[in-house]
Image (spheres, helix red, strand yellow):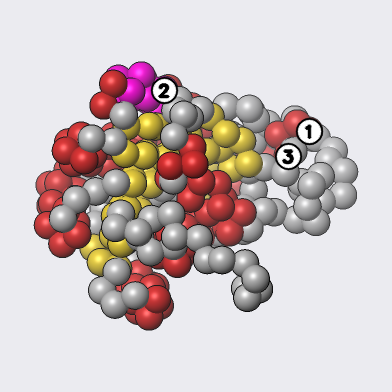
């Protein structure tokens, strides 16, 4: 950082919950918020990588990070995780509902009911439970910001063949967020959705690709590079910058927004 550029401190005294915090977009956002003096509760299933992240954040400021191993689709687990966060940091200001999986990918007739239900459980039920148990604490503060990680798939892009379940969950998240934005506006709680395109993360580890997907693909020719604005996929830090803006008071008049961050990827399809 240049010595002539003052450090931003937009989150002094504020607490954020980040689901899926251990890697990718969640990790980048946790680092950015903590650098700007937020307390951060790191919700993730991978305790090893989340604990490593907490060690890094606690070097910025002692005890600013809390690690909670939790499955966001587990109701009792989420209720307890939120309770522990509020107890630890005496309140809640920002919620980043970021946890999600790609799940099973393949022709609709080849997908099992358990494939469908697993992706729905993590991506939709997990988002619902995250909001359900954090909203009362945001109301106690008299304001707050909720950001939900969605996708261009199922919203501005429909040419990801075999991704019908994932895309359905992402379309559902947008509708849920917009309903929540209107419901919570009178409580000064803002709800916004970000729709990333391809971002260099490890979410592909959660993909179960059915070999039959090739049978339903319609060939589409893209120009060199997946995103016209970049040489390849976007970076988690690109998304973290957007999330931190939406979490801050700089976006105080923005709610119900659906913001695409994809380097013009979805304009190609």
Chief SS of the magenta region: helix
Q: Residue at x 13, y 51 (%)?
A: 83
Please tell me which of labels 1 and 2 falls first in the chain.
Answer: 2
Query: Does dot 2 land on a helix, a strand or a loop?
Result: helix
> Residue 143: horizontal and vertical position, in percent?
28, 36
Please tell me which of labels 2 and 3 falls first in the chain.
Answer: 2
In the rendered image of this protein, does residue 175 appear above or below residue 30?
A: above
- The question of residue 183 being in magenta is answered with yes
> Residue 90: horizontal and vertical position, in percent?
16, 55
Neighbour class for label 1 at 10 Å: few (<14), some, many (≥20)? few
Neighbour class for label 3 at 10 Å: few (<14), some, many (≥20)? many
Region of the chain picked out in magenta, as a range: 176-185
Let me know if residue 57 appears in the view. yes
* Quadrant occupied by the C terminus: top right
Q: Which of the numbered marks, if any, corresponds to residue 268?
A: 1
In the rendered image of this protein, does residue 154 appear above or below residue 210?
A: above
Neighbour class for label 2 at 10 Å: few (<14), some, many (≥20)? some
Residue beneath disc 3 = 265
Query: Does dot 3 land on a helix, a strand or a loop?
Result: helix
> Residue 247: horizontal and vertical position, in percent?
43, 45
Circles 1 and 3 in contact, beta carbons < 8 Å: yes
Residue beneath disc 2 = 178
- Left-right relation of 131 to 100: left
- The question of residue 73 being in magenta is answered with no
Q: Residue at x 29, y 46 (%)?
A: 93
- Nearer the viewer's eye, disc 2 or disc 3? 2
Label 1 to label 3, Cα distance in Å? 6 Å
In the rendered image of this protein, does residue 155 appear above or below residue 212?
A: above
Label 1 to label 2, Cα distance in Å? 26 Å
Q: Residue at x 38, y 55 (%)?
A: 11
- Left-right relation of 262 to 201: right
């Amino acid at each position: 950082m240049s010595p002539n550029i003052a450090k931003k401190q937009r989150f002094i005294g504020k607490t954020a919950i980040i689901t899926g915090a251990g890697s990718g977009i969640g990790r980048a956002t946790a680092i950015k918020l903590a650098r700007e003096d937020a307390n951060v509760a790191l919700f993730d299933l991978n305790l090893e990588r989340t604990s490593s992240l907490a060690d890094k954040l606690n070097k910025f400021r002692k005890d600013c990070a809390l690690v909670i191993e939790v499955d966001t689709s587990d109701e009792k687990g989420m209720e307890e995780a939120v309770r522990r966060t509020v107890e630890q940091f005496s309140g809640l200001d920002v919620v980043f509902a970021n946890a999600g999986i790609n799940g099973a990918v393949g022709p609709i007739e080849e997908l099992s009911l358990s494939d469908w239900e697993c992706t729905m459980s993590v991506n939709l039920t997990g988002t619902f439970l995250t909001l359900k148990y954090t909203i009362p604490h945001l109301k106690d503060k008299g304001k707050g910001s909720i950001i939900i990680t969605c996708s261009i798939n199922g919203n501005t892009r429909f040419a990801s063949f075999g991704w019908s379940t994932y895309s359905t969950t992402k379309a559902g998240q947008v509708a849920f967020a917009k309903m929540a934005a209107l419901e919570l506006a009178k409580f000064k709680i803002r709800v916004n959705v970000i729709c990333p395109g391809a971002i260099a993360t490890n979410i592909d580890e959660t993909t179960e690709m059915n070999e039959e997907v090739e049978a339903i693909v319609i060939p589409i020719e893209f120009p060199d590079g997946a995103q016209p604005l970049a040489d390849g996929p976007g970076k988690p830090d690109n998304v973290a910058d957007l999330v931190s803006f939406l979490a801050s008071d700089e976006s105080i008049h923005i709610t119900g927004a659906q913001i695409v961050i994809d380097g013009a990827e979805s304009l190609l399809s």
